[in-house]
Amino acid sequence: MIPGVAELLAVAVDGIGGAERPGQVAMAEAVQHAIEAGEHLAVQAGTGTGKSLAYLVPAVRHAVTTDSTVVVATATIALQRQLVDRDLPRLVTALKPVLGQEPAFAILKGRRNYLCLHRQNGGVAEDPQDALFDPADAGPASPLGRQVKRLHEWAEQTTTGDRDELVPGVPEAAWRQVSVSAQECIGQHRCRFGSRCFAERAREEAAKAHIVVTNHALLAIDATSGLDVLPEHAMVIIDEAHDLVDRVTSATTGELSAPAVEAAARRSVRLIDTEAGGSADVADGLRQAATALGLDLGDTRAGRMDVLSDALAATLGSVREAAGACAGAIRARAQEFEDDPPRAAACRMALSSLDELHRTAVRILEVFDAQIPDRREVVWLDQPFAEDARRPPTLRVAPLEVGPILRDRLFAERPVVLTSATLALGGSFNPLATQWGLPSADSAADADLAWSGIDVGSPFDHPRSGILYLARHLPPPGRDRLPEAYLTELEELIEAAGGRTLGLFSSMRAAKEAAGALRDRISHPLLCQGDDVTAQLVRQFSEDEPTCLFGTLSLWQGVDVPGRSLQLVVIDRIPFPRPDDPLASARQRAVAARGGNGFMTVAAAHAALLLAQGAGRLLRTTTDRGVVAVLDPRLVTARYGDFLRASLPPFWPTTDPKLVRAALRRLNAAPAAPAAQS
């Protein structure tokens, strides 16, 4: 008989050489209860809880006892690699003696993440305008060509074809030359490399595994596309669940640009029967639609679109019709290409791009068929910044809410466990649960979507380990340059801390402005995001104690620097979404139209999540000490301040700048503490 979860967890922790933690035990038991009850569970587990083991142990037990598969979905590559390279290998080794077998695990990503041997070996006809090699000498014609040459050399060595195993990586433009999407693949049985296909091997391994590790995007595609990209599975565990809504939104966003339409036209012209006059009429129609789209988008103001001009509506109609006509003409000839793999591959690629154009044009036009209160999607135009003029103006369309999608296609199918260090906003799980499509915790409706939330705490003693400094005396932030009072405050805090500062800014403009102003005013090295690749900057910051690092969004959630190198986290302002953010503004308006508080539901929830994530950078081990300084006085003075503060870790709060600087000076002068387990 297989032991219970508590015994298995003890065996696992002992086998790995760790120490069992109360929060870890509570979480494992809660996950096991959710599995047995067939209910959904949200678990907030602070850094250092050991939450990976807490959900993996009951997941492995369930998969082995029922001979089923459990899917674990994460948001970041780093956590995927941690699970597959470190946590799972050690776990299955520890549990094998008591389970009587070694649980199998696998990692599965979207097909685009694997090298396609067919395409890499010239299986797709090259578009002359996309050629990377000079036919005269068959050598690289550009830096991009050299990257592709490197990919061809790597293809002879790799055993997985997994893009993430290529270090250093290559630009997206180079990777696309050796990869295909699921829609572009000609199929294992028609491909001469089918028996060696990396993507198919990964799928086969996943189909045999007890635990399949994937990402939020693939989970979203499996739930929304009708494609069975994941193997049959009994339950889902979503780690980094605070990111779920954004990842699903991204995976379900469609985009349309003139270059994309033009590229589809070029692919089509070589596949349409010219003898029937097809290419002259059909493909040229798509090329003309591309030209018109480029002109119309160039004349359209960036941002959310509530009204569609007659000219752009007509052009989108032309794109829709021309893409559909080209796809129809190619499908009429598809049978001819069955025995010609290169032509079959080119056909699949062309149809994939044409179908995507058609779907996106239809989605955009259908948005404007409804009145604003009845719309379920939002459309906006992205215009390139001056420094990135190569990016074309792009129309995007995204769901106004992903909750209905998740409710119907994820939560209605099987039990789901969602976990993160940050799930309770304002002290409640309801704000995020509502975004996921679950009913409020106190709702009697939707019994089939029953769920519970539990906060298993943290091993950190937040009030004794950290100070939350609320700079109440500063002026409210404005839209112009950083006030001198902010720069002076930053300077004094950094000097008191002896450097060791992570500056989290709401915009890259503010980060660069602060870095430029302070480099001549402080006596410590100061790095700014953009000076080098982010990973290198974080490494340098971590290895050189007096160094400071300023940056924006990716640093709010992506920095793990334990020890004395990070003793001060500075947040310049409450990270509300920009007022002109198309999705956030449309979502606020939709909530208000239903009688809710759009600001609190959308903007404040967004800010609370980021604030909690940013503040969480400070304590990474039980011996870490320091200060989180928020320079925005609204966190104290505004009515919504209570909600935001309730979302933060329970540091000891103060508004006294002298007290904070004195505490930082004492930390700076103190000897280093012994290393502790995170």
Image (spheres, helix red, strand yellow):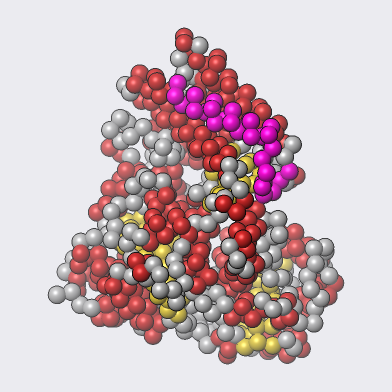
In the image, residue 426 sits, relative to residue 73, either above or below, namely below
Left or right for 309, reference 321? right
Q: Residue at x 55, y 37 (%)?
A: 361
Residue 245 position in % (x across, y down):
51, 60
Residue 366 position in % (x across, y down):
55, 41
Can I make out residue 80 in this image?
no
Q: Residue at x 51, y 80 (%)?
A: 621
Toward the right, the furthest residue is: 484
Residue 466 position in % (x across, y down):
61, 85
Q: Does the magenta stretch include residue 328?
A: yes
Q: Does the magenta stretch include residue 497?
A: no
Toward the left, the furthest residue is: 1
Left or right for 663, reference 154? right
What secondary structure do most residues of the magenta stretch adopt? helix
Q: Nearer the viewer, residue 482 or 135?
A: 482
Q: Residue at x 53, y 19 (%)?
A: 282
Residue 630 position in % (x across, y down):
70, 76
In the image, residue 389 sits, relative to residue 290, either above or below, namely below
Q: In which quarter of the image is residue 657?
A: bottom right
Left or right for 560, reference 579? left
Left or right for 64, reference 40? left
Can I make out residue 363 in this image?
yes
In the image, residue 528 sits, relative to residue 189, either above or below, namely below
Quadrant location, the N terminus: bottom left
Q: Quadrant of residue 236?
A: bottom left
**Magenta-drawn segment:** 301-329
Toward the top, the furthest residue is: 275
Q: Which of 498 and 225 is in front in this view?
A: 225
Q: Residue at x 75, y 78 (%)?
A: 633
How many numbered markers are drawn?
A: 0
Q: Quadrant of residue 480?
A: bottom right
